[in-house]
Image (tube, rainbow, N blue to C red):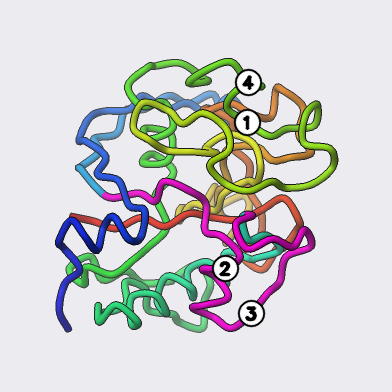
């Protein structure tokens, strides 16, 4: 299969090139800090919308219906399956290979296919070089419990970060690829960013939650990434 690599195709999918760098991560639950090198990659400007999700999968799972609202009520399995379907539609080799064990979803790093961001990539992109837990004043950048009126909202209506990424905080939580803690939680995957029903403390670039890869709820969606 061929690669999607020209600027027009990236623009049509609302993908932005994120620069390389280093991110310092921490997990207060396990009292751990570590640094990760991030290679340059593409990340979508917005969470996947209901319109795009329906175009690729034929499904409309969301509670808060709107073409340009983020898709929600999607599991981690739904999200990686979407990535593979989108890859196939764009004549790319799918990035993921499923096995019978949810702990062992395999990745084809040479495929050029679409994927979920890693935990480290997500935080690096969210902070956008600021080193801060928020890239702006919360009401101006995020839909959360104090301003969301009990629902999701159209993507891109709040201010973006300096990389041009919208809704990284608030609106919906976003699935990342990583297993959270295999020894303690098995196949649980990481989610990031906070959602429309979260308090201020839930909408931080450093906030990390986890759930089973089959879990679905009305404040949880995802955005797509692609390696260079």
Q: Residue at x 41, y 46 (%)?
A: 45
Q: Residue at x 69, y 29 (%)?
A: 202
Judge the density around disc 1: few (<14), some (14-19), many (≥20) Cα neighbours within 10 Å: many
Q: Quadrant of the N terminus?
A: bottom left
Residue at which label 2 appears: 51
Q: Quadrant of the C terminus?
A: bottom left
2 and 4 marks in contact (CB < 8 Å)? no
Q: SS at mark 3? A: loop
Q: CA distance from mark 1 to mark 3?
A: 27 Å
Residue at which label 4 appears: 138
Q: Position of residue 82 (x, y in %)?
A: 48, 73
2 and 1 marks in contact (CB < 8 Å)? no
- Res. 6 image quadrant: bottom left
Q: Which residues are magenta?
A: 42-69
Asked whether 214 or 50 is in front, the reply is 50
- Res. 93 image quadrant: bottom left
Asked whether 213 or 117 is in front, the reply is 117
Q: SS at mark 2? A: helix
Q: Position of residue 162 (x, y in %)?
A: 36, 26
1 and 3 marks in contact (CB < 8 Å)? no
Residue at which label 3 appears: 59
**What mark, if any, has residue 142 been given in the picture?**
1
């Amino acid at each position: 299969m061929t690669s999607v690599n020209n600027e027009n195709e990236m623009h049509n999918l609302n993908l932005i090139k994120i620069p390389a760098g280093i991110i310092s991560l921490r997990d207060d639950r396990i009292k751990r800090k570590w640094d990760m090198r991030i290679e340059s990659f593409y990340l979508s400007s917005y969470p996947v919308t209901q319109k795009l999700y329906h175009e690729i999968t034929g499904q409309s799972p969301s509670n808060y219906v709107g073409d340009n609202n983020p898709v929600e009520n999607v599991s981690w399995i739904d999200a990686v399956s979407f990535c593979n379907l989108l890859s196939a539609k764009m004549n790319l080799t799918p990035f993921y290979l499923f096995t019978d064990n949810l702990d062992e979803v395999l990745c084809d790093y040479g495929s050029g296919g679409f994927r979920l961001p890693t935990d480290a990539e997500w935080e690096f992109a969210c902070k956008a070089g600021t080193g801060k837990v928020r890239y702006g004043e919360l009401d101006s950048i995020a839909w959360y419990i104090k301003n969301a009126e009990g629902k999701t909202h159209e993507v891109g209506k709040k201010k973006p970060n300096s990389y041009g990424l919208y809704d990284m905080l608030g609106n919906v939580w976003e699935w990342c690829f990583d297993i959270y803690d295999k020894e303690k939680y098995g196949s649980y995957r990481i989610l990031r960013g906070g959602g429309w029903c979260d308090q201020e403390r839930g909408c931080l670039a450093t906030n990390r939650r986890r759930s089973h890869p089959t879990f679905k709820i009305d404040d949880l969606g995802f955005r797509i990434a692609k390696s260079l």
